[in-house]
Each structure stands twice: as C-alpha cells, then as structure tokens.
C-alpha cells in the first residue's frame, strides 16, 4: 500500500473509519462482523484506524479497542472529542458539541479508558464549538499532548481561516473533512492550506456515503436512524437526478479497468501526496475493494474528465441540511444546484 505522512506517523493512503460499525447508518453490525473487518484490515496493511467518542456514544471505541490493542506499536489510532453523547435528565443520550477545555479533557480521558490504551496517537477536535475560541480548545489539546495522553493534534470540519488560527496556536497534524467526487468543498481553500502548512488532509466519506459505489440505487427504504435520510442530496428526487452521473462514471471505470468504488477511492488519493482516504465499511469484500482503489494511479486526462463530470454545480442538493451545516465551519459553494 502507498504511504502518507501525518505528523510523526507514516500510514497507508487508505485508512479505516470505524463509525459504520455502530453509528449513523441505522442498525449496528454484530461484534463478530466488526471484528472480522478489523482483522482483515490489519492483515491487509491498514495502519490508520479512526473512531470518535460520538460514534455509538462510545460503543465504537469500546468495540475496536480490544482488537487493536495487541497491534498498538504498529498502527496509528485516531479518535475525536468535543462532540459526544450526554445523558439528559430524561435518561436519553443526545449529541452535544462542547469545545470547552474541561470537556475536551474529560472526552479524551473517557476515550482512553474505552480504547484500553495509555495514549491516542491522533486526537481531533470533532467539531469547533464556536462559543469557544479555537485557540482555547487547541490549547487544552496541546496540554493533553504535553501530559502524554495524545501524540498529535487534528481538527475536523473547519475552514482554512480557523485551521490557520489553530496551527498558529499549536502545530496541527491533520484536518479531517468530507471529500469525494461529489463533495468538493475542500477545493475552496482547505486542501491547499493543508498542503502549504504540511498538514495531512484525511478525507472522510470518499465513497459519497455509498452513492459513488453504485450499490445504493434506492433511498426510499433507508432504515430509521440513517443520517442520509435528512441530507438534501439523498432526498428521492435529488438522488434520482444524481444517479444519472453514475453511468458515465461507469464508462470511465471500465476504461480504467476498475470498479466504481475503486475509481472513487483512486480519485481521492490522487489529489495530492498529503491526502488520505478514510472510507468506512462493515464488509470485508468492500474493504478490499477500497484498498485496491488506493493502489490505482490515474492520469491527468482521466482526472480532468472526472472533475468535469462531477463539477459542483451539477450535484443536486447540499451535503448537509441547514441545521447540520451551521455546525461546521467548512467553506461552501455558493450556487443553486441544477
């Protein structure tokens, strides 16, 4: 597998996101199935594993910790704080964004316990709580690093200005945000800023939340709890129009001798030596398909053809609904989708 650099770490250019096991897309998978995917990833040479306090309100960390513990000296383990589950007076767990230093410290210490490790290699601020100056949140993360609880700092879903402010406070090793053929916001500033500052860009949802795989043809039957049901581009009318992009993409994939999924991953990792693809999956077969994509080199003409096919103005629907969009600081294309 091709290698990339994140701060002090060298990792494979395709990582494994561990959200899918128990969060965001409906019914969680069995422990046995999740462990099978983790073991397959380890055997295939995946070296970056990514989770968060939010995922399953800690369930993802508890699930992956025992499997990864024997391999801690050979992998890079990433988690996130600043957005986690908080139990209300009614006993219900709810997602809360809180970037205050005391909360980040508690999030980190809770994650360490669930993961069964003494140190988290890469620790992200999952969301910037804009009630708190980003320098304060990053400052507390720097103190956690000084204490040996984390090894490197990351940010998630922030724009270029906030990234630069944070980097001035303390070196940032990685920025994680959505990036794929049909989510191109990174190209408005953060991708270039990361390259300039020597920061890795970790691209989550490089498969477009299954859209780019071609395996999700209908969205009417999304199960309860699937976050895609609230996303504008996954609404039935918008999705039907977006599906029209897949036939020409399939023709390109056939010329390149690969599947749609492999082509989607290949496009992401071909965007720069500082870019790492972070797909999540609950399938061993899909895991291997994603990893094959990381080995494909695309020429400039083919990349340009894909760029034109998936130009942002041709995508129907935003990636987030308005309420979720307000929670992130990423740059946004100002256009009415056709």
Image (spheres, rainbow, N blue to C red):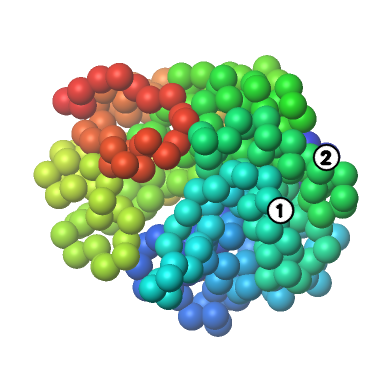
**On screen, 308 above or below 208?**
above
Mark 2 or 1, nearer chain start: 2
Instruction: Answer few, some or many: residues within 10 Å of disc 2's Cα (few below 14, many 20 plus, some between 14 and 19).
Output: few
Say what secondary structure mark 1 lies in: helix
Q: Position of residue 66 (x, y in %)?
A: 71, 75
Of the pair 241 and 100, the residue shown nearer to us: 100
Q: Which residue is mark 1?
A: 105
Side (left or right) of 31 relative to 312:
right
**On screen, 196 above or below 2?**
above
Say what secondary structure mark 2 lies in: loop
Question: Does the residue at mark 2 contact the one at mark 1 (Cβ under 8 Å)?
Answer: no
Of the pair 53 and 2, the residue shown nearer to us: 53
Of the pair 338 and 105, the residue shown nearer to us: 105
Q: Position of residue 55 (x, y in %)?
A: 51, 62
Quadrant of the rendered image containing residue 202: top right
Side (left or right) of 206 relative to 221:
right
Q: Position of residue 309 (x, y in %)?
A: 30, 27
Q: CA distance from mark 2 to mark 1?
A: 22 Å
Of the pair 96 and 167, the residue shown nearer to us: 96
Q: Which residue is mark 2?
A: 8
Query: In the image, what residue occupies the spot 16% across and 25% down?
Result: 338
Query: In the image, what residue occupies the spot 66% across and 39% down?
Result: 137
Side (left or right) of 74 relative to 195:
right
Q: Is residue 168 visible?
A: yes
**On screen, 59 above or below 242?**
below
Query: In the image, what residue occupies the spot 36% across and 37% down?
Result: 325
Picture disc at residue 314: none
Q: Is residue 14 visible?
A: no
Query: In the image, what residue occupies the spot 53% across and 39% down?
Result: 129
Between disc 2 and disc 1, the foreground one is 1
Q: Position of residue 275 (x, y in %)?
A: 61, 34
Instruction: Answer few, some or many: residues within 10 Å of disc 1's Cα (few below 14, many 20 plus, some between 14 and 19).
Output: many
């Amino acid at each position: 597998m091709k290698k990339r650099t994140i701060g002090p770490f060298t990792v494979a250019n395709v990582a494994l996101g561990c959200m899918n096991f128990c969060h965001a897309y409906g019914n969680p998978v069995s422990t046995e199935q999740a462990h099978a995917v983790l073991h397959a990833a380890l055997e295939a040479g995946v070296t970056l594993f990514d989770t968060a306090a939010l995922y399953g309100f800690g369930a993802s960390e508890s699930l992956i910790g025992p499997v990864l513990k024997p391999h801690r000296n050979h992998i890079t383990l990433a988690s996130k704080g600043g957005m986690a589950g908080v139990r209300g007076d009614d006993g219900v767990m709810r997602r809360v964004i809180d970037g205050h230093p005391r909360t980040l410290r508690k999030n980190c210490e809770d994650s360490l316990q669930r993961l069964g490790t003494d140190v988290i290699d890469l620790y992200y601020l999952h969301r910037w709580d804009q009630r708190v100056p980003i320098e304060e949140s990053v400052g507390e993360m720097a103190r956690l690093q000084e204490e040996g609880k984390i090894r490197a700092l990351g940010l998630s879903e922030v724009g270029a200005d906030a990234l630069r402010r944070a980097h001035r406070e303390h070196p940032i090793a990685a920025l994680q945000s959505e990036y794929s053929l049909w989510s191109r916001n990174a190209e408005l500033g953060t991708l270039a800023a990361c390259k300039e500052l020597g920061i890795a860009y970790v691209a989550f949802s490089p498969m477009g939340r299954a859209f780019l795989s071609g395996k999700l043809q209908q969205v009417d039957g999304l199960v309860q709890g699937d976050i895609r049901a609230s996303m504008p581009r996954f609404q039935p009318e918008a999705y039907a129009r977006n599906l029209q992009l897949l036939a020409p993409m399939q023709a390109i994939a056939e010329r390149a001798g690969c599947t749609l999924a492999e082509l989607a991953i290949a496009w992401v990792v071909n965007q720069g030596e500082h870019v790492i693809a972070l797909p999540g999956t609950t399938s061993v077969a899909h895991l291997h398909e994603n990893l094959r994509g990381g080995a494909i080199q695309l020429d400039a003409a083919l990349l340009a053809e894909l760029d034109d096919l998936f130009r942002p103005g041709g995508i129907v629907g935003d990636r987030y609904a308005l309420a979720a969009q307000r929670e992130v600081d990423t740059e946004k294309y100002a256009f009415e989708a056709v």
